[in-house]
Image (tube, coloured by chain):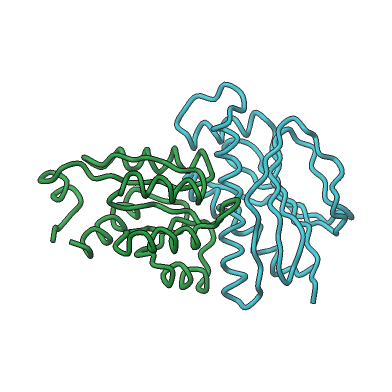
């Protein structure tokens, strides 16, 4: 796993959360896992293609998702409505898009898929079995967890 | 030629904008920002094909165009809109903004590029730029 790419995804997610929320966010820890997994209620998956392949998974519990979505939309959340889900998916897309931009500008060709968001699905097993770095990010609204599961094709 | 968006709007008939993004939240957010400017009305399209149809129907003053969308992507959509209307004013709005992609968007005919997340001021500057350049 290319650690500079992993760092780019974690850093960009932290930056975007800070930019959007206007409050302090922090990476509490980082840990390696054998496979990607996500067990919280709201899961966004973005696929990566190019010289590196894999997925970035961002998962959070429903209460955090509703609070984040409510802040982004300026509306009181009443469950994970389509607009709330879209706001979480777009937040993930902005975070991963910023990292993709940096990685491409540094010479590695990499593209991303549009985000897919799942709610109440408790995705415990993932079809791509790559070594995964997991980083919980603390925000004022709760924890946002990013899992980077990538494989270098070169 | 006008100095600012507000001075342009105060002396003119309403401007029209087409917001193209597959994300419901981004369409909501961009239309919310547009509403904060005076005298601009916004319509929306959720993908490239719909954007081309709506552009031909509405002839908006400017377009806000996402790049990464399911189906026909933003850059290809800009090319098709510019084939129909070579004077189309398109502002690209994208979470992915690496040098090659930005160049590709400008080569396709886009007039301005805003990386997401989009702020009111970044959008104001972009609109003033594309409308001012064409005035």
**Based on the displayed image, in which of its 4 quarters is residue B37 positioned?**
top left
Q: How many marks?
A: 0
Query: In percent of the image, x 83 and y 56: which residue is there?
Result: A32
Closest to the observer, A21 or B132: B132
Closest to the observer, A78 or B51: B51
Give the percent coordinates (x, y) of residue A5: 69, 67
Give the vertical position of A27 relative to A154 (above or below).
above
- What hue does chain A carry in this figure? cyan
Query: In percent of the image, x 44 and y 64: which residue is there?
Result: B79
In this view, which residue lies farthest toward the top? A78
Give the percent coordinates (x, y) of residue A11: 62, 59
Left/right of residue B11 with respect to residue B85 in the rendered view: left
Closest to the observer, B51 or A109: B51
Query: In percent of the image, x 30 and y 38: which residue is there?
Result: B35
Give the percent coordinates (x, y) of residue A116: 67, 44
Left/right of residue A121 with respect to residue B68 in the rendered view: right
Query: In percent of the image, x 77 and y 59: which residue is there?
Result: A54
Give the percent coordinates (x, y) of residue B104: 48, 71
Quadrant where the C terminus of chain A sits is bottom right
Which chain does green denote in the image?
B
In this view, which residue lies farthest toward the left? B11
Give the vertical position of B21 relative to B2 (above or below).
above
Quadrant where the N terminus of chain A sits is bottom right
Give the vertical position of A15 relative to B53 (above or below).
below
Closest to the observer, B31 or A63: B31
**Based on the displayed image, in which of its 4 quarters is residue B133 positioned?**
bottom left
């Amino acid at each position: 796993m290319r650690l500079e790419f992993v760092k780019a995804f974690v850093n960009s997610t932290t930056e975007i959360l800070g930019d959007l929320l206007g409050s302090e966010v922090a990476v509490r820890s980082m840990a390696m896992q054998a496979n990607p997994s996500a067990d919280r209620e709201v899961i966004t998956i973005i696929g990566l293609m190019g010289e590196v392949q894999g997925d970035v998974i961002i998962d959070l519990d429903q209460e955090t998702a509703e609070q984040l979505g409510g802040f982004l939309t300026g509306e009181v959340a009443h469950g994970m409505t389509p607009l709330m889900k879209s706001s979480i998916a777009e937040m993930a897309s902005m975070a991963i898009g910023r990292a993709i931009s940096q990685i491409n500008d540094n010479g590695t060709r990499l593209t991303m898929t549009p985000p897919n968001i799942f709610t109440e699905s408790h995705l415990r097993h993932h079809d791509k079995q790559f070594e995964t770095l997991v980083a919980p990010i603390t925000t004022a609204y709760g924890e946002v967890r990013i899992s980077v599961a990538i494989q270098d094709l070169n | 030629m006008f100095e600012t968006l507000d001075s342009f709007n105060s002396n003119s008939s309403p401007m029209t904008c087409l917001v193209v993004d597959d994300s419901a939240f981004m369409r909501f957010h961009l239309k919310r920002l547009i509403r904060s400017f005076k005298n601009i009305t916004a319509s929306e399209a959720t993908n490239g094909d719909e954007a081309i149809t709506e552009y031909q129907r509405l002839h908006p003053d400017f377009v806000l165009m996402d790049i990464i969308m399911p189906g026909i992507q933003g850059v290809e959509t800009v090319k098709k809109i510019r084939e129909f209307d070579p004077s189309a004013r398109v502002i690209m709005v994208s979470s992915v903004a690496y040098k090659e992609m930005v160049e590709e968007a400008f080569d396709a005919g886009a007039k301005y590029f805003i990386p997401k997340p989009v702020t009111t001021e970044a959008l104001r500057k972009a609109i003033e730029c594309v409308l001012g350049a064409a005035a």
